[in-house]
Amino acid sequence: MFKDNLISMRKIHGYSQDELADKIGVSRQTLSKYETGESLPDIERCRLLADVFGVTMDDLVNYDKSDSANLGMEVPPKGKHIFGMVKVGDKGQIVIPAKARKIFDIHCGDNLIILGDEGQGLAVIKETALLDMLKKRDE
């Protein structure tokens, strides 16, 4: 996964092997070995790579775009997530994936607000988060 993610992210960002190698302080040959899987970067180089691409180290190393939950998408930017697909039930209900509930601290009984933009779609936000934003705006 790492080597595939590295190649993909390098190409998405438009870097040559020389340019990326220079950004993280290694030779082009070393970067090439990372991309072929012949060797792996140390933790510091991995952190630098993640910073250059604006992704988490965990996603850079472990993200698997072939996982059906990721919908074939590339490594997401830091703070952005792909939780997979959900089906809408006959009464409009959806199940929020467990990983999303954990990351956003959503529990049974929490109130969620559904926002909509006809051009961009729907958004879900916790009631408490929206109220906090509105209080800060009014201060």
Image (cartoon, grey):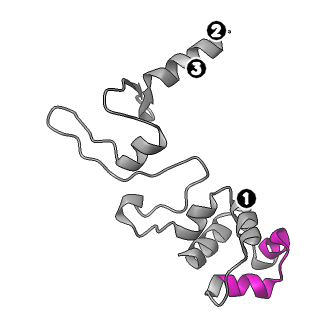
Q: Secondary structure at mark 1?
A: helix
Q: Amino acid at mark 1?
A: Asp
Main SS of the magenta part reads: helix
Q: Earlier in the sequence, mark 3 or mark 1?
A: 1
Residue at horizontal 80 percent and vertical 83 percent from the top: 28
Residue at horizontal 78 percent and vertical 88 percent from the top: 29
Q: Secondary structure at mark 2?
A: helix
Circle 3 crowding by C-alpha within 10 Å: few under 14, some 14–19, many from 20: few
Q: Amino acid at mark 3?
A: Met
Q: Earlier in the sequence, mark 3 or mark 2?
A: 3
The span picked out in magenta is 19-34
* Numbered circle sitting on residue 87: none
Q: Quadrant of residue 59?
A: bottom right
Closest to the observer, 117 or 131: 131
The residue singled out by tag 3 in the image is 133
Residue 42 among those drawn in magenta: no
Q: Amino acid at mark 2?
A: Asp
The residue singled out by tag 2 in the image is 138
In the displayed structure, 107 sits above or below 81; it is above
Residue at horizontal 23 percent and vertical 41 percent from the top: 88
